[in-house]
Amino acid sequence: MPTLLAIGASPRYDHSTSRKLTSLFVEKWQAAHPGGQVIDRDLLKTKLPFVDLPWIGGAFTPAEQHSPESAAAIKISDDLVAELKAADHIVIGTPMYNFSIPAVLKAYIDHIVRVGVTVTPDNVGLLTGKKATVILASGGDFSPGSPIEQYNQASGYLRQVLRWIGITDVDIILAGRARSGGMGETAVAQFGGAVAAAAA
Ligand SMILES: Cc1cc2nc3c(=O)[nH]c(=O)nc-3n(C[C@H](O)[C@H](O)[C@H](O)COP(=O)(O)O)c2cc1C
């Protein structure tokens, strides 16, 4: 049975363009994969700690040497990695913040990029055979040919970090011109077709 991991990173919930489009993606994916499992990873509710010294101790020393603090810190990461490994398709719905990704999504990435776990010490990504779709909502239009296309640091970064852990089949849907005061009303009409195609 295929599994979809749906990652949400917007605090705007009902008003969020990325969440509206991610919900549509999930709906279309379920229709295309009857009986498939969907795991919801809402990063606003997950409240992930940032990488700290106990986490680093846990990530870079053998389990038998872990202090209780390191064991607890790395368990959060281990659980997120297990969830990611179980997924065949990952959809990441995220706003663009300051030309890049929100801190909650970066905190998640810092937990799931693990030497010896998701990438080998000689830089071979271990999460192969998966597909990822990124839905990136932004106020500006960063589509190809736009004068501010090069300001978008989020797409290239996400593509690179996913490739680093072995996920090379990555689709990015740029849902631009979504004003921060707006409610995402037009998002489905504008980008629904691209989202549905990515979920098929
Ligand atoms: C803190 C913050 C930073 C933002 N930075 C950018 C930015 O750098 N470029 C941009 O085009 N839009 C930016 N925006 C606008 C959001 O990307 C846009 O409102 C988007 O719809 C947010 O996604 P959401 O609707 O899923 O919450 C920013 C919004 C906020 C709240």
Image (cartoon, rainbow, N blue to C red):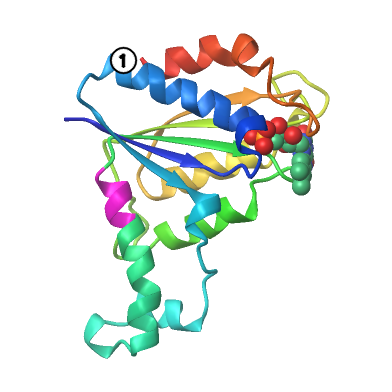
**Magenta part of the chain:** 81-86
* Rendered residue at 57%/44% (across/down): 9
* Number of numbered discs on residues: 1
Q: Is residue 80 above or below residue 70?
A: above
Residue 55 in percent (x, y) is at: 44, 77
Q: Quadrant of residue 180?
A: top right
Q: Nearer the viewer, residue 137 or 163?
A: 137
Question: In this rendering, would 1 be left or right of 119?
Answer: left
Q: Main secondary structure of the magenta part?
A: helix
The residue to which callout 1 is attached is 31
What residue is at 36 percent from the left and 73 percent from the top?
Answer: 74
* Residue 84 falls within the magenta-colored stretch: yes
The magenta stretch spans residue 145: no
- Quarter of image, ligand 1: top right
Is residue 191 at least partly visible in the picture?
yes
Is residue 124 shown left or right of residue 184? left
Q: Residues within 10 Å of mark 1 (few under 14, many from 20)?
A: few
Q: Is residue 34 above or below residue 87?
A: above
The spot of residue 166 in percent (x, y) is 35, 45
Query: Label 1 is placed on what type of residue?
Result: Ala
| Residue in view at x 71 percent, y 24 percent | 176
In the picture, which quadrant includes the C terminus? Answer: top left
